[in-house]
Amino acid sequence: MSKNHPLRQWRIKNKIILSELAKMAGTTASSISRVERGIQDPSLALMVRIVQATNKEITLHHFFLDWAENDSAA
């Protein structure tokens, strides 16, 4: 079972839906969704806008964590 992206964890904790965060970050809900699912690597500009939209609760560091790695050992 894979872990949730820190951005998704932050959204759930703060009860913010995709479209709200997207508006705050100046992007689309589908773009945020792709970032959270690990399908799209955000541009530096988008990462900065997300950091600003989350009042720095999400930092640039969060985008470089290996959050999608499985918990189970082989």
Image (cartoon, helix red, strand yellow):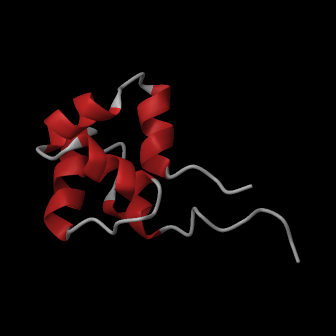
Left or right of 44 in this view: 60: right
Q: Is residue 23 left or right of residue 21?
A: left
Name, please, the residue furthest toward the right: 74
59 or 39: nearer the viewer = 39
Residue 32 image point, x, y percent: 31, 48
Q: How many tags in the picture?
A: 0
In this view, the residue farthest toward the bottom is: 74
* Above or below: residue 32 compared with residue 44: above
Residue 3 position, x and y percent, is: 64, 53
Residue 25 image-quadrant placement:
top left
Identify the residue at the far front of this view.
Answer: 30
Using the image, determine if residue 52 lies above or below residue 43: above
Image-based side of 38 in relation to 43, left or right: right
What residue lies at 59% left-to-right and 64% top-to-bottom? 68
The C terminus lies in quadrant: bottom right
Residue drawn where x is 41% and y is 34% of the image: 11
Task: Say which residue appears at 21% left-offset and 39% top-offset.
Answer: 22
Residue 8 at x, y percent in the picture:
46, 42
Task: Classify the position of the N terminus by image quarter.
Answer: bottom right
Q: Quadrant of residue 10?
A: top left
Nearer the observer, 15 or 29: 29
Quarter occupied by residue 29 = top left
Where residue 24 appears, x then y in whole percent? 16, 35
Which residue is found at the position 57% from the left and 49% from the top? 4
